[in-house]
Amino acid sequence: MRYSIVPLRAEHWDAVARIYSQGIATGHATFETEVPSWEQWDASHLADHRLVAIRDGEVVGWAALSPASDRFVYGGLAEESVYVAEEARSQGVGRELLEALIAGSEAAGIWTIQTGIFPENEASIRLHERVGFRVVGTRERLGRHGDVWRDVLL
């Protein structure tokens, strides 16, 4: 099954927010408990590094980079997020999005992409390993998710 990978624009936000909400609902995708507004999300992500996967005219996944720090020395370090719609999981969408995001970041001079993944999110860990990420450590009790302290793999 083929997907078009295109830049994420404001008009994609409703679909992106729906997919983000599905990820939040799993309890294993993010510390967030609700989807931010477009304005909040837009302000926190790098404008040139946001992608959506479109199949049959519908957004079925998204990936984006956000700055890891505002310090100049970390200008080539970015934090990555990738989310795939429930109906499109395990179909290669996440991999295509990540590969395109990585290619774009390398062309732009970003030298390191990092991400944080809950250890329970085994599908995300496998996806990231397939495209070259590796676990470099565990940040124990990084934050509370509801009433539970959560570890995050870096």
Image (cartoon, rainbow, N blue to C red):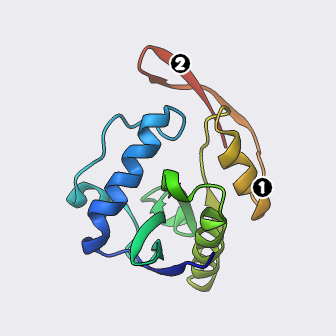
Question: In screen coordinates, is 40 left or right of 27?
Answer: left
Residue 89 on image: x %, y %: 59, 55
Residue 111 on image: x %, y %: 65, 71
Q: Nearer the viewer, residue 20 or 37?
A: 20
Helix or strand or loop: what does disc 1 sit on? helix
Question: In screen coordinates, is 136 left or right of 28?
Answer: right
**Residue at figure coordinates x 27%, y 61% from the top left:** 14
Q: Residue furthest bottom?
A: 107
Q: Toward which corner of the image does residue 141 lie, by quadrant? A: top right
Q: Which mark is residue 129?
A: 1
Q: Nearer the N terminus, badge 1 or badge 2?
A: 1
Three-letter code for the amino acid on which mark 2 is drawn: Trp
Q: Residues within 10 Å of mark 1 (few under 14, many from 20)?
A: few
Three-letter code for the amino acid on which mark 1 is drawn: Glu
141 versus 132 height, above or below:
above
Which mark is nearer the camera, 1 or 2?
1
Q: Which mark is residue 149?
A: 2
